[in-house]
Amino acid sequence: MRSPEIASVDDEHAVRAADCVRRSRLLLTLAVVTLIVIMVVPAVLVASLAEPAPVFMTAGVAAGFGFWALPHACNARTPRRRHGPDSRYLTARTWTGHRTIDLQALTHVRGWREVYRSGSTTYVVATDAFGVRLGFSDPADLRLIRRAVERMQAKLRVSTQP
């Protein structure tokens, strides 16, 4: 599927931006509805139970996993593929399917670090002008995004006049 936004790319790996956004919204909607059901159904069941603790413990664990997993839904998995003129586009597989971002049209880059007992992992989520989000945690991918942002900053003209 080739995107009209990236029609100049003669590559079967380019995924339409509208498809990427639609799939990610579908996953988010399903996750939120599932979490609401997990939180509401146990409350209804507890009214008839003498010991409600097991119901709420199970619902709490399931909801906690859901809230942990949602930010990771856009993380890039292998294989990743750069294509197009000057390797402008990056296509990677995520939980919701393949996504293609335009590395020369990034509008938002956000990062966070998850700290564990054994170390930490840095995540960066890049959003392009078409609204496609793709997350990265591999150090090579983080360098790729850093270079893309540096190239974009070099092209910007800074004006000090109001």
Image (tube, helix red, strand yellow):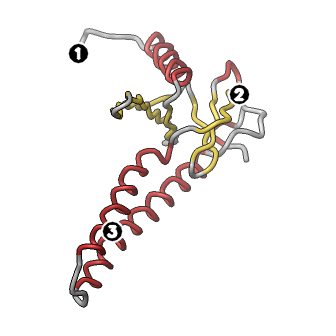
Looking at the image, tell me whether mark 3 or mark 2 is earlier in sequence order.
Answer: 3
Q: Secondary structure at mark 3?
A: helix
Looking at the image, tell me whether mark 1 or mark 2 is earlier in sequence order.
Answer: 2
Q: CA distance from mark 3 to mark 2?
A: 44 Å
Residue 85 in the image: above or below residue 133: above
Q: CA distance from mark 1 to mark 3?
A: 54 Å
The local crowd at label 3, few if under 14, some if 14 to 19, many if 20 or more residues have their Cα within 10 Å, is many
Name the residue that disc number 1 marks. Answer: 162
The residue sitting at the bottom extreme is 48
Foreground label between 1 and 2: 2
Q: Are marks 1 and 2 in contact (CB under 8 Å)?
A: no
Q: Secondary structure at mark 1?
A: loop
Name the residue that disc number 2 marks. Answer: 83
Look at label 1 and name its amino acid: Pro
Viewed as shown, does residue 71 lie left or right of 138?
Answer: left
Look at label 3 and name its amino acid: Ala
The residue lying toward the viewer, choosing from 110 and 57, is 57
Residue found at x 38% / y 27%:
119
Residue found at x 46% / y 19%:
149
The residue lying toward the viewer, choosing from 121 and 149, is 121
